[in-house]
Amino acid sequence: MASEAKEDVRPCDPGTSESGRMQNSIKEGDFVIFKKENILKAIQIRKNRTMFLEKMKFKLDGAIGHPYGTMFEVCNMKLVKVERKILNTEDATDKGIDNRDLHDRNLENQKLSRDEIVEMKKEGLRGQEIVDQLVENSATFKIKTEFSQEKYIKKKKKKHVSVYTILRPCTRLISDMYTNKGPARILNLRIDSLGQILSQANVRANSRVIVMENTLGLVLGAVLERLSGLGCVVSVYSGTDVHGSRPAVEVFNFTKEQLAILHHYPLHELDTVNTDIADTNPQSINTDTVTIEKKSTDIAMATASDVAMENDSDKTGIESGKDKTNENEIIKDNSKGDTTEKNEAIVAIKNTDTEQGVTKETKEKATNGDNKSKRFRYEKEEHSEKKAEWRNKVEETRKILKAGDFDSLIVASKFHPTPIVMDLIEYVAPSRPIVVFSQYKEPLMDCFSKLRSRGGVLNLRLTETWLREHQVLPGRTHPLINMSATGGYLLTATMVMRD
């Protein structure tokens, strides 16, 4: 696989029609991909939102309304559109000048000091203007080879020019983003392996696909992008949080129509698919219900207990205050008998004020306790409604899954794939593909053996793809120095009818 070293800024254009141009503009609330060389970051566009990217602080307002693929430069915490320059395609050949007379005297070779560069930035000079000044004030730039000049300019631009390209999210960009950031989070799934999964599973419009994945929703989002709202997808998820386990799906900016074909089913309920009634007490919902009920009960009990304890402590404090006052009265009576009546009057006034304050504080705490109890009762009722709604959706998905006749099965899980595949393979129609991905070979070897023993599958294959990425430049084409060791392993098979 070859890749050009120049920046790839091709937006995922939805079309050239009027509606396509409208969709191609950046809108508030959309997720976009900020790209600078090999750095990719998904950001949601919001007005007055301040972002930090590569030690740069800026607001996103300037991007709204511009088409995808526009280049922006950070200037005074704002995104300013910059015109795209036409790249010079002439061969960068050596013209006889070499670097033999160059000496590493940085302070002498560059006339501009660090303080002067900082002052330029404060005055509002753009990054490209600063780079031009650095080139003009370099004593050795003109005697460098053209290759060295290009490297020098590239290095200075990386440091001083903050130009980002805003692109529309798509499978390729999102996959590259997660691969560059942390490939272990997506099970070291490379873009070439993802492409093979979609191809081997024959994912197309109007397909019915079962997906079980733990790649942050990358595989699921790629399938939904291929279907584009036509077909059916059953996502078998693990854990208790459906949406939190697939953040990549949110980045795709799918519409409601595109997400309408997506159905969720919990992994721990696969054994109830063929029953008449699914488990009415699922772990994915019951856990949250118990937590809220326990939290509501604990807070109500704690509130009542606090009020009672504070009342007791206040009364104890009053009684102890009376005892101390009586002792003081006895002492003072021995010394000066004429001050006893005054002290008794003062103590009586203080006790009255204290009792009134305690009564008022007790009422306030009781009111707050009632408000908390009402709030948690409301949350409990609201959660019960959501629970019933979600239960209905799970039951609907169970019926869809039970009907079977699915066109493909895709498994890319962090768990051992064999039991998952054995449970889900029953719902795949004959002559349909099965694709299982794992970053390790051994689990797939076990699954290979179990499928062959079971029967009903043909063309079992266990493969690994080797990817070599190249830099393609005039006179400088070579493989990249740093490459990934593996993109994972694929187990593919085709379902057939058993006797």
Image: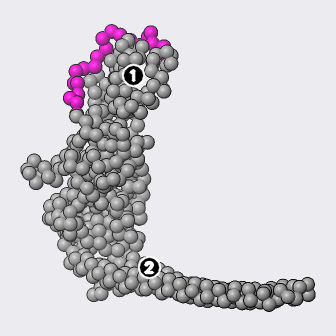
Few, some or many C-alpha atoms within 10 Å of disc 1 (few <14, some 14-19, many ≥20)?
some
SS for tag 2?
helix
Between residues 235 and 287, which one lies in front from this camera angle? 287
Q: Name the residue under label 2.
A: 287
Between residues 144 and 52, which one lies in front from this camera angle? 52
Residue found at the far right of this picture: 334
> x, y percentage for residue 477?
30, 27
Q: Residue at x 39, y 79 (%)?
A: 285
User: In the image, 321: left or right of 223?
Assistant: right
Which of the 4 image quarters holds residue 412?
bottom left
Image quadrant where one finds the C terminus: bottom left
Q: Assess whether residue 96 is covered by the magenta stretch.
A: yes
From this view, report whether residue 1 is shown above or below residue 365. Answer: above
Disc 2 to disc 1, C-alpha distance: 62 Å
> x, y percentage for residue 426?
27, 73
Which of the 4 image quarters holds residue 398?
bottom left
